[in-house]
Image (cartoon, rainbow, N blue to C red):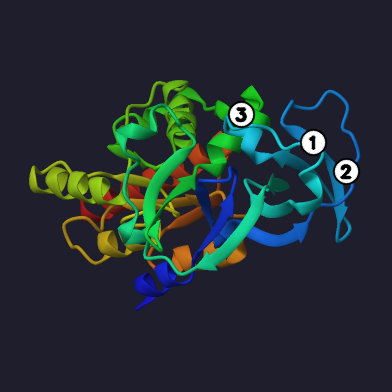
Amino acid sequence: MIKNATNQSQGMLLFQLTARQSFAIGTLKVKEIVPYTTLTAIPHSHPTVLGAANLRGDTLPIIDMAKAVGYPSLTNDELSTCYIIITDCQRMLVGFLVRGINKITACNWHDIEAPPSTLGNNVFVTGVTMVDDKLIQLLDVELLLSKVFPEPPSSLHPVLTDMQREKLRPLKIILIDDSSVARRQLSQALDSISVPYFVATSGLQALDMLKHAAAGGSPFDIVVSDIEMPGLDGYELAFEIQNTPSLNSAYIILHTSLSSEISVSQAHQVGAHEALTKFEANELVHAMLRGAERKQTALTLTA
């Protein structure tokens, strides 16, 4: 029951960046939608940042989302009819200015498919689905934010002692995320400390890899998974792992770009050992170390 409820709790917000194409983001990322308001300039900001808005006592940057993903910029004449989508994502409040809001619709996240090759190199799209016989592109908000607000190097590279590193190196680790930027961040964090790992781009692919490894007598020790993923999300993946005897020795770390205590609570309900708001390399790696210590304790008790 828990795993199904998590998928049903999130719909999609449909909006326009161009006159012809609709886009979407998950509603759990959306804090509020407001009409365009006067902005204050932010010196030396990214070219896609139009300025700052003061909304409900919070001052937040406003991004021209169309320009950020490669479409024509909003013109001054268009601003009065535009809307700001306020998101709570990656530990920051950000507003995205869009040409128009369509609607919020229910979504079966299992029906979202990988982007077709005809979309070319539009890396900001993580999936596509059909709504009212129209193609909807699901935007990779994490990737967009990483381009506008690059993470400082200190947050991407963990600091470990030699002893801590050697605790992680023998473990079989899998990293799972549908966002290319998140996979790159996770990979860079472990590459920087010379810890090996496997990568999956979806929950379904990860579950297949987990089952194959367990059947071969070499199960995964640590599972690091995004929560929001089409097909099989992180909650469902954790639930499947915990309810499959050959897999449930794995230490499960779920991470999310949503700054929400609800997400963390649900993660624990489905059997995850830890839940983190991404991305901070030291937090992630120290969660892995706790997984290593748990495994060592289990081995000691069975010895």
Answer with the quarter of the image where residue 171 lies: top left
Name the spot of residue 3 as percent of width and height, x first: 36, 70
193 or 79, nearer to the observer: 79
Give the mark nearer the N terminus: 3 vs 1: 1
Q: CA distance from mark 3 to mark 2?
A: 21 Å
Q: Which residue is mark 3?
A: 147
Residue type indicated by callout 1: Leu
Q: Nearer the viewer, mark 3 or mark 2?
A: 2
Up-down relation of residue 88 to residue 280 (above or below): below
Q: Which mark is residue 39?
A: 2
Name the spot of residue 238 as percent of width and height, x first: 34, 59
Q: CA distance from mark 3 to mark 1?
A: 15 Å
Q: CA distance from mark 2 to mark 1?
A: 7 Å
Quadrant occupied by the N terminus: bottom left
Give the mark nearer the N terminus: 3 vs 2: 2
Category of crowding for the residue at label 2, using alpha-carbon neighbours closer than 10 angstroms: few (below 14), some (14–19), many (at least 20): some
Q: Which mark is residue 97?
A: none
In the structure shown, which secondary structural element does the residue marked by tag 1 occupy? strand
96 or 153, nearer to the observer: 96
Up-down relation of residue 243 to residue 69 (above or below): below
263 or 50, nearer to the observer: 50
Residue drawn 41% across the image and 67% down it:
7
Residue type indicated by callout 2: Leu
Residue drawn 45% across the image and 54% down it:
228
Q: Is residue 39 left or right of residue 135?
A: right
